[in-house]
Image (cartoon, rainbow, N blue to C red):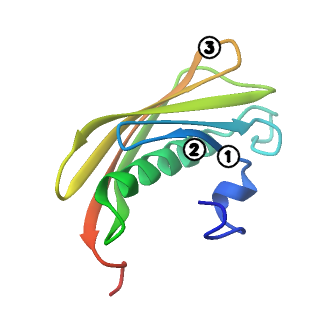
Amino acid sequence: MQAMNPDSLMTRMGIEVLEASPERLVATMPVAGNTQPYGLLHGGASVVLAETLGSIGAALHAGPDKAVVGLDINATHHRAARSGQVTGTATALSLGRTLASYEVVVTDEDGRRVCTSRITCLVRDGAPGA
């Protein structure tokens, strides 16, 4: 994924995918460099991690002749992360012909839930804008 676009947001945020299948994805992201002014993990960074995982999963599900675009995402922030890294685990909720939905749980290094997100992607024929 990073080779496709080495200057992507995924690369700049330090997201590293550890496991990827249409049904389950796991990635890590450092807290350092992704914080808000109080030094806590920025809520938007958790959402970027969730959207990255959901979009990759949807693309794997859709296959190479399809394109996926985010349609809806929401997030509930449960606690702050201050250091180390967080881990996002995306689990498929529904994998259909035109929609793919995932629940993404972001946890800190102690396994405590930092954020819960849900993302739905639209599966399209060909590249967006084509």
Residue 126, given in percent of the width and then of the height, sits at: 31, 78
Q: Residue at x 60, y 13 (%)?
A: 112
Q: Is residue 120 left or right of residue 29?
A: left
Q: Are marks 1 and 2 in contact (CB under 8 Å)?
A: yes
Question: Which residue is denoted by mark 3 in the rendering?
Answer: 111
Precedes in sequence: disc 1 or disc 3: 1
Q: Residue at x 36, y 67 (%)?
A: 64
Q: Is residue 21 left or right of residue 11?
A: left
Question: Which residue is denoted by mark 2 in the rendering?
Answer: 49
Relative to 58, does residue 82 appear above or below in the rendering?
Answer: above
For badge 2, the amino acid type reads Leu
Instruction: Give the quadrant of the N terminus.
Output: bottom right
Question: Where is residue 118, by image quadrant?
Answer: top left
Precedes in sequence: disc 2 or disc 3: 2
Instruction: Give the quadrant of the C terminus.
Output: bottom left
Q: Is residue 114 left or right of residue 105?
A: right
Cα separation, mark 2 vs mark 3, equals 16 Å
Front position in the image: 5 or 50: 5
Structural crowding at the residue carrying mark 1, measured as other residues with C-alpha within 10 Å and reported as few (<14), some (14–19) or many (≥20)? many
Precedes in sequence: disc 1 or disc 2: 1
For badge 3, the amino acid type reads Gly
What label sits on residue 15 in the rendered view? Answer: 1
SS at circle 3 = loop
